[in-house]
Amino acid sequence: MEHKASLLQQVISTEWEMFRTVNGDRYVDCQQDPETFAGMRTAQFRAWPPEALRSYANDLAEAKRAGRNLLREKYIRMMRSTEPETYALLRRELPEDTPEGFRDTLEQVLGLGAENITVHTLSLKKGSRILLEVRVLFISIPPPPGVERYPFGLL
């Protein structure tokens, strides 16, 4: 088992690389302050169990191999509410979510030993493709053990 300190260092180092290139080669002040970045991220990640930290380190490494910048994607998602016009221009950079991807993520989280999981918000337009696919999957695929299923509209 990897030591938590080395996992922390791995995650923070990879995140720093991604954070530095969120805007390509344009930098703002906080992108030139690795010490503060490391301090802030360390404070957040210390509370994570090693299994979750290892999973995130693997996600970062996989994204990096695929040429994705998870921090850029996070900021683009935040722009949906903070800068809708910019979000409209950049959202095509985000990977498409699918019902299968959602289920895979849920199974991974459950595999980390979560005692309960609540999905608070999932808002879909009536005619959206993912909603139609979710309805088909919802009917045809049984939920993983420990997951309760509620019919659409009951929550």
Image (cartoon, helix red, strand yellow):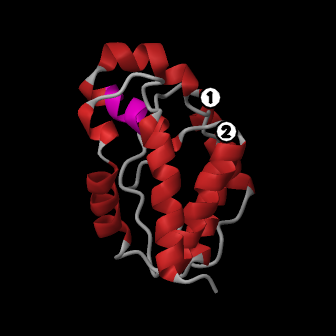
Q: Horizontal placement of 60 versus 37: left or right?
A: right
Q: What residue is shown at x 39% (from left), y 22% (from top)?
A: 26
Q: In which quarter of the image is the C terminus?
A: bottom left
Q: Position of residue 31 (x, y in %)?
A: 33, 38
- The label shown at residue 105 is none
For badge 1, the amino acid type reads: Arg
Dominant SS of magenta comes to helix
* Residue drawn where x is 41% and y is 75% of the image: 48
Neighbourhood count class around disc 2 (C-alpha, 10 Å): few under 14, some 14–19, many 20 upward: few
Label 2 with label 1: CB-CB less than 8 Å? yes
Asked whether 143 or 56 is in front, the reply is 56
- Determine whether, in the image, residue 46 is placed left or right of residue 40: right
Q: Name the residue under label 1.
A: 129
Magenta residue check for 3: no
Identify which amino acid the numbered label 2 is placed on: Glu
Give percent across and percent down for residue 114.
Answer: 49, 78
* Position of residue 148 measured from the top left corner of the image (x, y, whole percent): 52, 70
Q: From which residue to which does the magenta span run?
A: 74-80
| Mark 1: few/some/many CA within 10 Å (<14, 14-19, 20+) | few
Residue 28, picture quadrant: top left
Q: Is residue 95 above or below residue 5?
A: above
Q: Residue at x 52, y 43 (%)?
A: 70
Where does the image place residue 61, in percent across and percent down from the top left?
65, 54
